[in-house]
Amino acid sequence: MEASSEQQKKSENSSSSSSSKLLLYSYWQSSCSWRVRFALSLKGLPYEYKPVNITKGEQFSPDFKRLNPLHFVPVLVDGDVVVSDSYAILLYLEDKYPQRLLLPADPRLKALNLQAASVINSNIQPLHMLSVLSHLKEKVGPEE
């Protein structure tokens, strides 16, 4: 009985938020934002694209700072829920909208997928971030 009421609650939560439009604050060249756009597409979830031009510093605007004080894209707004960071957004979408799964159900395969995502997020992605590249140029010069 508890499992069925849990499933019903999850279904109600999914349908209540699906009536509100998903908003994605994103920059078109951001690989983190690309990940989220791919996931939204694979899940068949409609969303409104809100461009944030990070090369012009739009992520530092007071309005965007209220959404994400860290000034990073992407940011997903789902009703009254605001989630930043592509990895957190993907996991949120997976739990909130389970109709088309992104991750395998098998725990071993799911762990391998999460391991690969973690390697990219922790080891590769930081080297492509605009803030890291700007800091390196400032500290060691553009030639290095």
Image: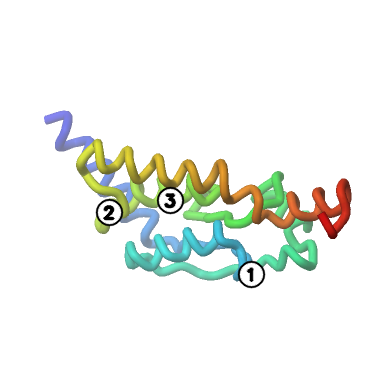
For residue 51, which numbered disc appears in the image? 1
Q: Where is residue 131 in the image (x, y as percent from the top left)?
A: 75, 52
Residue at 80% across / 49% down in the picture? 136
Amino acid type at mark 1: Pro
Q: Nearer the viewer, residue 16 or 96?
A: 96
Q: For marks 2 and 1, give the CA distance.
A: 27 Å
Vertical comparison of 54 with 140: above or below: below
Q: In this view, does 92 lie to the left or right of 3?
A: right
Amino acid type at mark 3: Leu
In this rendering, which labeled residue sits more in front, label 2 or label 1? 2
**Does the CB distance between marks 3 and 2 fall below 8 Å?**
no
Q: Where is residue 119 in the image (x, y as percent from the top left)?
A: 49, 43
For residue 72, which numbered disc appears in the image? none
* Residue ID for mark 2: 101
Quadrant location, the N terminus: top left
Q: Is residue 109 left or right of residue 83?
A: left
